Amino acid sequence: MGFLDFFRANARWLAVGFLLTFFSSFGQTFFIALSGADIRAAFALSNGGFGALYMAATLTSAATLPFFGRIVDTMSPRRVLAIVLPALAAACVLMAIAPGVAVLFITLVALRLFGQGMMTHVAFTLTGRWFVANRGRAVSVTSVGNQAGEALLPVSFVVVSGLIGWRESWIVAAAILIVVAFPVLWALLKVQRTPQSADVAAKSIEGRQWRRAEVMRDPLFWIVLFGVLAPPFIGTSVFFHQTWIAEIRGWPRGIFAAAFPVMSAMTFAFTFVSGTLIDRFSAVRLLPFFLLPLALACFILAGFSHPVTAFAAMAMFGLTYGFSSTLFGALWPEVYGTAHLGAVRAVSMSAMVFATALGPGVTGVLIDLGVGFPSQLLAMGVYCLFAVPVLVVVSRRFDDRRSGQR
């Protein structure tokens, strides 16, 4: 089946995944960081202070997600939507009216848990269950929702906040979630998809169906996380400190907002490339390669100061994100099955949220201590290169395990 035929036949369910990840943007770091300078000014926070608060909020979200994320296995998608999306909208309202640091902390916890955490978790869990032989393509469409948000929302938020103020812009975000996102997703989720015979359903159900406790005891799972956590840690650090990077390089403050569409275009293109490659070769075999562009992005930002550097680095971020967002939507059901996918994904998603918490906190404290961000980026690039041979070994072990199960 060609991609256009596949899209037309499954537009309803592909739209669910796309919209969930798109509207998760309101809880993603790149969106929250657009208000970073205003938040620091309003609450008298330094880079390190705001980074530490953000880290604590995201860690709280990460600790909650493995328990809360299991509702995807026990509740209908509509019931999950009725909990998660209004909670995200309420968090947006809270950001607009937060009177002090304590309420700001609660706001950040809710944005991270229900936005970055649950909206993304629900999207990829449903897609992983609904599709089998074309899982790579389906996950790629779901992933594109993130890129669409990164492409459209930063510039939109900058324009709207310039017209009505940054707090009022968060009210607009809440209204969009309730008035637009909720009724559309509610209507789409009226019909559930069951994998068809053409999906070669046996491909999904053959072999072992791992429970979460079994996955937690699997050493390969934790070694894979060694690589999985690099993009969220590094990307969140860069996006969170985007205004600071611009300041120390002497760039215009909005340069990263202007570069986000470049990243999104690259992510968009390579999301579909990786989806096709996954359906052809498997996620396991593509696992070792997704960190190479990320390493290059770190080295570019660390070593060059011309404004075009921001655009080149964001392009490399996009290449890695295009591969990784699709890769890890397909890897877990491919390796551990779909029977307990919600519980398994909740653990990996929690770890990724944990990485996004550490990034701004650790890098912000290091900045306050006088460790230059370019030096930190250089270390991050070396980390990515070191992870590649480790993932080569893991990929081969996963392949051997699957061959033994068959």
Image (spheres, rainbow, N blue to C red):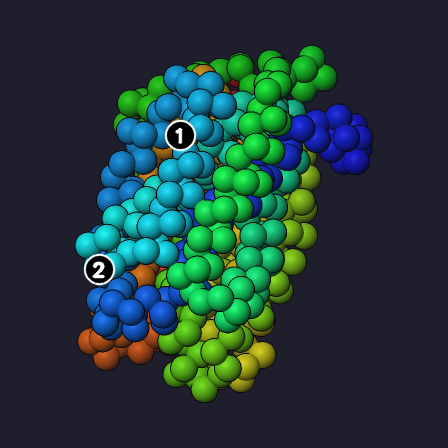
Q: Which residue is mark 2?
A: 100
Residue 181 shows up from this direction: yes
Q: Report the residue at 60% width, 51% height from top.
A: 148
Residue 208 left/right relative to 10 = left
Q: Amino acid at mark 1?
A: Ile
Q: Report the residue at 58% width, 24% height from top.
A: 189
Image mark count: 2
Image x and y of residue 391, in percent: 44, 45
Categorize mark 1 by other alpha carbons within 10 Å: few (<14), some (14-19), many (20+). Answer: few
Q: Amino acid at mark 2?
A: Gly
Image x and y of residue 132, in percent: 61, 23
* Residue 82 quadrant: top left
Residue 400 shows up from this direction: no
For residue 5, above or below residue 276:
above
Residue 345: mark: none
Pointer 1 or 2: first along the chain? 1
Q: Farthest residue toward the bottom? A: 250
As helix, strand or loop, the secondary structure at mark 1 comes to: helix
* Residue 9 quadrant: top right
Residue 371 left/right relative to 175 = left
Q: Report the residue at 65% width, 58% height from top.
A: 265
Q: Which residue is mark 1?
A: 83
For residue 66, above or below residue 104:
above
For residue 250, above or below residue 293:
below
Q: Residue 342 or 71: which is nearer the viewer?
A: 71
Please tell me whether mark 1 or mark 2 is closer to you in this view. 2
Q: CA distance from mark 1 to mark 2?
A: 26 Å
Tell me if label 1 and label 2 are in contact, CB under 8 Å.
no
